[in-house]
């Protein structure tokens, strides 16, 4: 890909997909490259740089370049899911390596770390990473090789200080990886704060249309550890397919506009729901009374994201009943799409989840925030009698 001639902003570069056009037709949208194999040169080499579809693809590369630009990284890889991307980082470690991970994090990855990582010979300790003293105590110099954090964390939206976590990890000779799915490159730049790797479930707001399952890793340096991840992605066939990469590229073109609108609406809803008589607590880092608000304000730009949770004063059954009575909000798993979603999260995560049973997780889309509030307020009143 040809480098931009001027230092345009990330928003501009994303909107034009780094300025790439089709050299044959001059189309402003590059074609989807679906070939699985490529012609060798007469000397048996591959001067095009492409050999086979399992390790590489031109359309996927183009989307990776946009994502690396958005995160300010040296390189990026796209995977078939967020879990494929995340587990590739852990698989790049050696047997016996020690990992520190947060107690509150994406449930599927937490389950994998708690139950499957030991099959890879890894030793995993879970700690409250928002407590820097606890994090420091859990990291052992010479033993800990990776510190994994998620901020804001799903579904309680706690905040971990990325710069401080990076300092702790690096002082012990470990790397810091950050799941920045909910913050997104619009709100947070973990690599600039000292992180070594950023992970995204690109299914979410990066794509934004609930029609692609994808994961991504972005690295601060193309070092030996990244080379190991490269081997895993290429050898195990975890690459994102070209059609999905094309759709993701389409989503990233409007990413900045959607992220701004969704974040503004989430902030409005958080403030209004905090005053609702049926709501006991709103979990949103943009609220001044949130325990992580000061750290979030320091390390997040352009607002505090599109995700929030509410805890109902009347408890679990009222939460489930509220989700059943909405009309505009969609009762569905996932987040970051243009449509707003509501979910009783504890029912999904099951036994061992740190998620309170009275909690509803809200992913705010691009609808009119007044409509979203009216629909949810009506459901709360009908479920609890409080309105």
Image (tube, helix red, strand yellow):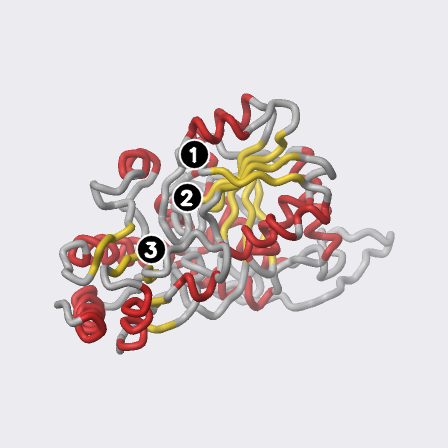
Q: Which residue is mark 2?
A: 151
Q: Position of residue 135 (x, y in %)?
A: 48, 31
Q: Which residue is mark 1?
A: 162
Mark 2 nearby-residue class (10 Å; few <14, some 14–19, many ≥20): many
Q: Earlier in the sequence, mark 1 or mark 3?
A: 1
Q: Residue at x 45, y 61 (%)?
A: 207
Q: Taking the image as drawn, is residue 194 in sight?
A: yes
Q: Position of residue 15 (x, y in %)?
A: 39, 55
| Callout 3: SS | strand
Mark 1 nearby-residue class (10 Å; few <14, some 14–19, many ≥20): many
Q: Position of residue 143 (x, y in %)?
A: 65, 27
Q: Which residue is mark 3?
A: 307
Quadrant position of residue 320: bottom left
Q: Nearer the viewer, residue 286 or 289?
A: 289
Q: Earlier in the sequence, mark 2 or mark 1?
A: 2
Q: Cα distance, mark 1 to mark 3?
A: 19 Å
Q: Taking the image as drawn, is residue 69 in sight?
A: no
């Amino acid at each position: 890909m040809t480098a931009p001639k001027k230092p345009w902003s990330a928003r501009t570069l994303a909107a034009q997909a780094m300025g790439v056009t089709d050299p044959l037709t001059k189309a402003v949208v590059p074609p989807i490259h679906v070939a699985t194999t490529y012609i060798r040169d007469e000397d048996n080499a591959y001067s095009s740089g492409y050999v086979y579809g399992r390790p590489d693809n031109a359309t996927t590369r183009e989307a990776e370049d946009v994502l690396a630009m958005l995160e300010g990284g040296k390189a990026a890889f796209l995977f078939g899911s967020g879990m494929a991307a995340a587990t590739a980082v852990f698989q790049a470690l050696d047997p016996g390596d020690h990992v520190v991970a947060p107690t509150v994090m994406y449930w599927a990855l937490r389950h994998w770390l708690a139950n499957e990582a030991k099959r890879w010979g890894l030793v995993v300790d879970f700690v409250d990473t928002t407590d820097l003293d606890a994090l420091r105590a859990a990291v052992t110099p010479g033993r800990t090789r990776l510190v994994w954090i998620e901020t804001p964390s799903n579904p309680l939206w706690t905040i971990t200080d990325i710069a401080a976590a990076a300092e702790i990890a690096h002082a012990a000779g470990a790397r810091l990886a950050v799941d920045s799915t909910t913050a997104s490159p619009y709100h947070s730049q973990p690599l600039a704060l000292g992180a070594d790797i950023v992970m995204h479930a690109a299914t979410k707001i990066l794509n934004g249309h609930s029609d692609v399952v994808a994961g991504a890793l972005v690295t601060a340096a193309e070092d030996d550890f990244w080379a190991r991840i490269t081997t895993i992605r290429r050898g195990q066939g975890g690459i994102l397919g070209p059609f999905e990469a094309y759709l993701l590229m389409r989503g990233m073109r409007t990413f900045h506009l959607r992220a701004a609108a969704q974040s503004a609406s989430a902030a409005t809803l958080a403030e209004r729901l905090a005053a609702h008589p049926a709501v006991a607590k709103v979990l949103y880092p943009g609220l001044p009374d949130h325990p992580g608000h000061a750290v979030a304000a320091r390390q997040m730009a352009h607002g505090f994201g599109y995700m929030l949770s509410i805890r109902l004063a009347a408890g679990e059954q009222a939460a489930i009943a509220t989700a059943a009575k909405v009309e505009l909000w969609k009762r569905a798993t996932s987040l970051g799409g243009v449509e707003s979603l509501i979910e009783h999260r504890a029912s999904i995560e099951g036994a061992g989840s740190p998620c309170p049973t009275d909690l509803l997780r809200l992913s705010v889309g691009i609808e009119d925030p007044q409509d979203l509030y009216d629909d949810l307020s009506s459901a709360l009143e009908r479920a609890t009698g409080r309105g």
